[in-house]
Image (spheres, rainbow, N blue to C red):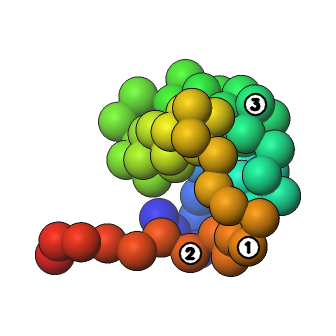
Amino acid sequence: MSRIEESSEQQRDLCTIFTQGLNAYCKQSWQEAIKAFYESIKIHKKDGPSTYYLQLCEKYIANPPGEIWDGLIHLKNK
């Protein structure tokens, strides 16, 4: 990334859409988050964070987290 005044319109759009997806993820609005992460991937095909969160959302649709969910991601490996 770069400073905002040095970024392209495409980079700014990507950040805006990813943020929308992340906000939806935090609210457990899985379908809304998936839509945003797919849009991010359309802008930047190799966007790792969007791909990662997209997979998490699909996992949570199939196996919803419990009532007590803090949105934190617990990694098992480095």
Mark nearer the N terminus (3 vs 2): 3
Q: Which residue is mark 2?
A: 72
Label 1, secondary structure: give it. loop
Residue type of the residue flagged with mark 2: Leu
Disc 3 to disc 2: CB gap under 8 Å:
no
Task: Check disc 3 and report the residue beneath it.
Answer: 31
**Tag 3 secondary structure:** helix
Where 59 falls versus 72 (above or below)? above
The crowd level at tag 3 (other Cα within 10 Å; few <14, some 14-19, many 20+) is some
Q: Amino acid at mark 3?
A: Gln
Q: CA distance from mark 2 to mark 1?
A: 11 Å
In the picture as drawn, the residue positioned furthest to the top comes out as 42
Q: Which tag is nearer the camera, tag 2 or tag 1? A: 1
| Type of amino acid under label 1 | Ile
Q: SS at mark 2? A: loop
Measured as percent of width and height from the top left, residue 25 is found at 71, 53
